[in-house]
Amino acid sequence: MTDGHIFALFSAQNIIQTGTNTIFELRDQDLWTRIVRVLRLNSGECVILFDHNNNVLIELLPVTFERKGIITGYIKNISKNHVLTPEINLYACLLKKEAFEEVAYVGAQMGVTSITPVLSEKIQRKWGGERELERLGKIMIAACEQSKNFVLPIINKPISFDTLIAQKLDQEFFNIVFDHAGQSLNIIIKSLSETKSKINLLFGPEGGFSQSELDQLKNLKIYWCALTPTILRAREAIVLGVGVVRSITWQDSF
């Protein structure tokens, strides 16, 4: 690989065409514009392109800059996208639009497996439908490009709190609910660091869960965790909570 920063860009197309040490060619006007017009890369510089399954490091050839819309390069390396373990599923009660977009970005950046908005009693807005789902998908792509996490999280449609309780908080998972009245993170770190289970993380809305929701949660096998001795805003709790859990449980299998 070359010295310096190498940009990573997502392709909706299948990028694997040939093997290492061969010529790569991809017709994609949007990607070509980003490489040539936006990032202003030059012949001889490298870029990583990734799709849903693979990533490829290519050295851009002069012909890329001579033919509009066609990316041509010398393949220096091809890899399967590395799935981070353990699986972390993020269930976040729907926040205001800007705050939830930040949640989607951070979740993708830190390698969560899926993000599911939860419609609890205290949410303060309506879900934006397919348009919001599409926008969140684009935000997660940008986060994966920045972080070089080549596996895009699944972004699910919202579910009700009752559905979450009935179907989603699988008791075979390591389930954590973040709440300011919970135990200190120090108390559950040992169990968390040793778990081989998949992990579900649940965060409430601004103002917290309603009493009836808290009562339902208390009937399940869940760890209650307070991240700090102070009360955090929901978006800040999610950033901190996801980061801590990923850091503690990260299994280096590269």
Image (spheres, rainbow, N blue to C red):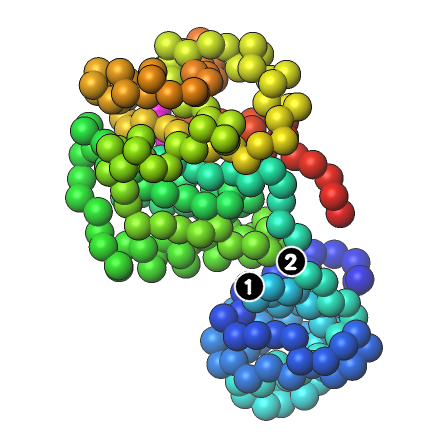
What crowding class fits label 2: few (fewer than 14 Cα within 10 Å), some (14-19), or many (20 or more)?
some
Q: Quadrant of residue 220?
A: top left
Residue 100 visible? The answer is no
Vertical position of residue 25 compared to residue 44: above or below:
below
Q: Quadrant of residue 229?
A: top left
Vertical position of residue 101 compared to residue 187: above or below:
below
User: Tag 2, which secondary structure?
Assistant: loop
Q: Which residue is mark 1?
A: 52
Name which residue lies at 53% across and 75% down. Answer: 13
Name which residue lies at 52% across and 80% down. Answer: 28
In the image: residue 192, left or right of residue 136: right
Vertical position of residue 96 compared to residue 81: above or below:
above
Q: Would you say the magenta stretch is mainly helix, strand or loop? A: loop
Q: Residue 74 at what x, y percent from top left?
A: 76, 78
Instruction: Assess whether mark 2 and mark 1 are in contact (beta carbons under 8 angstroms).
Output: yes
Q: Residue 126 at what x, y percent from top left?
A: 17, 44
First to last magenta residue range? 231-235
Q: Is residue 52 magenta?
A: no
Q: Earlier in the sequence, mark 1 or mark 2?
A: 1
Distance of label 1 from label 2 (alpha carbons):
8 Å
User: Tag 1, which secondary structure?
Assistant: loop
Residues 80 and 167: in front is 167
Name the residue type under label 1.
His
Residues 131 and 60: in front is 131
Mark drawn on residue 81: 2
